[in-house]
Each structure stands twice: as structure tokens, then as C-alpha cells.
Amino acid sequence: MSTRTVIRGGLVITASDELHADVLVEDGRIAALAATGTPAAQAWTAGRTIDASGKYVIPGGVDAHTHMELPFGGTFASDTFETGTRAAAWGGTTTIIDFAVQSVGRSLREGLDAWNAKADGKCAVDYGFHMIVSDVNEDTLKEMDLLVEEGVTSFKQFMAYPGVFYSDDGQILRAMQRSAENGGLIMMHAENGIAIDVLVEQALARGETDPRFHGEVRKALLEAEATHRAIRLAQVAGAPLYVVHVSATEAVAELTRARDDGLNVFGETCPQYLFLSTDNLAEPDFEGAKYVCSTPLRPKEHQAALWRGLRTNDLQVVSTDHCPFCFTGQKELGRGDFSKIPNGLPGVENRMDLLHQAVVDGHISRRRWIEIACATPARMFGLYPKKGTIAPGADADVVVYDPHAEQVMSAGTHHMNVDYSAYEGRRTTGRVETVLSRGELVITDREFTGRAGHGVYTPRSTCQYLL
Ligand code: URP
Ligand code: ZN
Ligand code: ZN
Ligand code: ZN
């Protein structure tokens, strides 16, 4: 049987180009592109032909920030690697980079082994790992070098969550100095967690227990302050910096200033900050708990700065920070005390569609859609051009996308293992139709045709996005 597939007649969109072209896939990779209707394209024969006329042909999404099965607040994120990567495929994402966790007192290796074991043989699409560093010491620093060599080339540190994932400025500086030497990229959760914990305690003492107070104590200024501090620590260390889940106008301003100064400072935002707001956190009857994540949702006025940052490239990546907890039994742990609501939102299935809606709404261009959702995350985390583009030699991770189909997002129809949708009832234009992962059909005309274990661990090179 032929291992060749031809995708005919679509509009191929990459971060740099749009062209009406046929795409030849062979042995799991893109073999060639040729303008539709030309003799070169017509000469191709293949065992399988996919008709993409009237559709977009785009690279599979690269979601550089997910938390399948993350232990948090006494429970676990409700998507496993199996359910979460299947939902990713449904949403047109063919690569995730999840976060392995080092526990305090344990080695990085133990954490990485544990996460490899969770994912091995379970994933529908390809995956890699960042490492959460919770305990910086001499041994950890040495282990960082080894991990970089093995393809775990990025490390998340937390200025928030004292007593859990938190690192102090000295620990952060040490890890940054090490990454300046070994080529690793520090990813920062930039919120002043020490100050926030004081405000949490004071709020609870005043009887302010509702989910909306989660947004009030985690102040935009404390995100901006931490962002500023992280930037200056990275500057002192001579290391690049990637700030995760940026939500506040004031934090974007810090990134913009640093980039104007020529620093290798990068920022990621997430669909929830672009499409949701404190209005959701304020929903009555504890419904606001569905929208508790950190950094928190902000008042609507912040969205303009995020869209602007995405247009000016002061923000480079949109990832989901997919970290689902069911409303029933999980979010409910925080009834009567917002600080006990597990932090995180579902979204791995929704990202490509929400960002296409941003194209429809005029916030970004089609090529920018592909850049922030596919190409730049691949380059930022050392997967390019294997992932993130459609070009000869790249993995055949390809989505046939119908830009005219209408859909309504809902927990009733989504594939994430969580009992609510953060976007319930939202109408969007555009829908994933067919998805190839390394040349294999994982979604075929809106049917799941993939399998657990098709997705493989994908080691990464160091950051390919440095100035
Ligand atoms: O609320 C969030 N973001 N949960 C996941 C953990 C993190 O900080 O990214
Ligand atoms: Zn056209
Ligand atoms: Zn975080
Ligand atoms: Zn996260």
C-alpha cells in the first residue's frame, strides 16, 4: 500500500506565505508542494487523496503550555495524556509541550521519569516536556545541563505559590545563570506570590471568599512587578527569558520596554485572557470558580493591550495553559474559600478555533494566526522546522481547516475530560475538518481515527528564536 497522500486544492497558509497548492505527503513527512493545477502537481499519484478545495491547509498547532494530570491543590488536572491529546487533535493541535514537575527534595530526573511514564503509549499526538524546577540547588543545576542535552531545553520557575513551586530571587538568578551557559530557556510564572499571599489572607479575614476575589488579590501591578524583576534578573544573568500566561496591560508594557532595549525577552498569552474577563469570575452561584486560573482573568480593558502585543510581536506565542478541573468535585473544593479552588482552565481543544475567530474579527492576519499558534512556539522551543510549518522535510502534521463552518463551543460536544466549557455557547466561524499527524489520519472528516500511542516523545533543540 502506498504511504503517499496528496492534499489537493487548498489554500496553504504558513507563517510566511499563502499559496494555492497541492501538498504531497510521503513516509510521514511533507515531500513537496506544487501550485494547484500545474503539471507538477497533477503528475503526483498517491494511495490517498484529500480534497481541500475551499479549505485552508495549515500546519498542525503547537501548544507549548499544557498540564495533563497535573497535581494541584490536592487534586489532579482532569485530562490524562490520553484524553487531553485526543482533544488536542480534535482542535487541530498536533504537538503539545507539557510540564514535568520536580518535587521539592527530589531530582529533576525523578520528575521527568514520572511524566514520561504517564505519557508513554498514551498520546494521540506528539509531545515534549518542559521541566518545572521547584528546588534549585547544586545538583539541580547540574541536572539542567543534562536535560538540555537530552531535549528538555526549557525550565519553568514560579515567583508565585510560596511553599509549592516558588523560587526566590537567588534561586531564580542561579537557574538563569545556568541557562545562560547551557542554552536552556527559563519560562517564568511572573506574579509576586509573597505579596499575593498576604492579600489572600487579608481578603479571607474580611469574609471575601467568592471566586471573584481571586482576581482582586492577584493584582495586575503584582504581575507587572514580577515581570519587571524577572526581566532584570535575566538581564543580569545574560539569559533569555520567556514569560508565560501574560494577562495584564502593565506586564505587556514591561515586555515591550525590554524588547525595545534589545533584550531576548519573550511573552506568551492564552485565549482565556483574550476572550474572557473578570466578568466571568464574577458569575453568581460559585460559577466564577470555572474561571479561576493564575495569572487571573483581568477586566476587559486589558484585552486591547494583549491583542496589540500580538500584532506588534511584543507577545509572540498563544498557548492554552490547559489545566482542566471539573466544576463538580474539583473546583468545588474552594466553596467558601477562593484560595482553595484549583487553578486552571481547559482549552487545548479550543485554541486554534478561537484564534481563527480572531482572524475573522480582524485582530490578526491569517499568517499571524499560524505564526503565534504553530511556527513561533516551534521555533521558541526548538522544534522547527520539524513542527510548525508546511515545507519539504517537515513532519506531515497538517490540518484541513474549513474557514466557513460555524460551530458553538460546548461541554456537550467537546472532547476534553472536563464537565464544563469556559466558552459555553460561544459561536465561532471555522472548524477543523481533517488532521494528519506524521502523515497518519487522526481526525478524518470530523471523526477521530487516531489512537493512543501514535503520538511520540519529541526531544527539542535549544531556542531558535533568539535575537
Ligand atoms: O492557573 C494555572 N495557570 N494553572 C496551571 C499552573 C500554572 O501556573 O501554569
Ligand atoms: Zn483563495
Ligand atoms: Zn504558571
Ligand atoms: Zn501553566
Image (cartoon, rainbow, N blue to C red):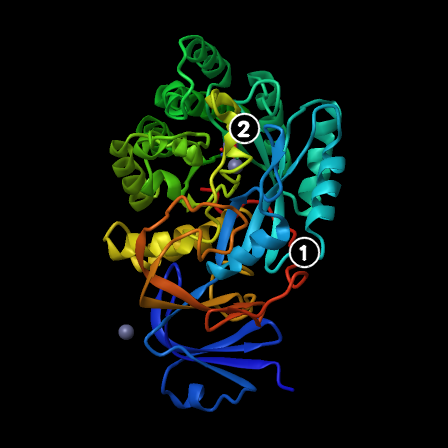
Query: Where residue 76 sits in the image (x, y, percent)?
Result: 62, 37
Which class describes the residues within 10 Å of circle 2: few (<14), some (14-19), or many (20+)? some
The amino acid type of the residue labelled 2 equals: Leu
The amino acid type of the residue labelled 1 equals: Lys
Q: Nearer the viewer, mark 2 or mark 1?
A: 2
Q: Of callouts 2 and 1, which one flags the residue occurring earlier in the amino acid sequence?
A: 1
Q: Is residue 41 left or right of residue 30?
A: left
Circle 2: element type: helix
Residue drawn where x is 68% and y is 61% of the image: 453
In this view of the protein, which residue sits in the foreground, 322 or 61? 322
Residue drawn where x is 70% and y is 47% of the image: 118
Q: Quadrant of the C terminus?
A: top left
Q: Is residue 425 left or right of residue 328?
A: left
Residue drawn where x is 29% and y is 46% of the image: 311
Q: Hey, which residue is sitting farthest front in the picture?
A: 285
Label 2 vs label 1: CA separation? Answer: 29 Å
In this view of the protein, which residue sits in the foreground, 281 or 221? 281
> In the rendered image, which quarter is residue 404 located in?
bottom left
In this view of the protein, which residue sits in the foreground, 177 or 274? 274
Query: Where residue 330 sits in the image (x, y, percent)?
Result: 55, 34
Question: To which residue does mark 1 refer?
Answer: 122
**Vertically, is 297 above or below 347?**
above
Question: To which residue does mark 2 refer?
Answer: 333
Query: Where residue 199 sits in the image (x, y, percent)?
Result: 43, 12
**Vertically, is 426 above or below 276?**
below
**Vertically, is 44 above or below 164?**
below
Query: Where residue 69 sits in the image (x, y, percent)?
Result: 62, 42
Which class describes the residues within 10 Å of circle 1: few (<14), some (14-19), or many (20+)? many
**In this figure, what is the number of numbered marks?**
2
Residue drawn where x is 32% and y is 51% of the image: 426
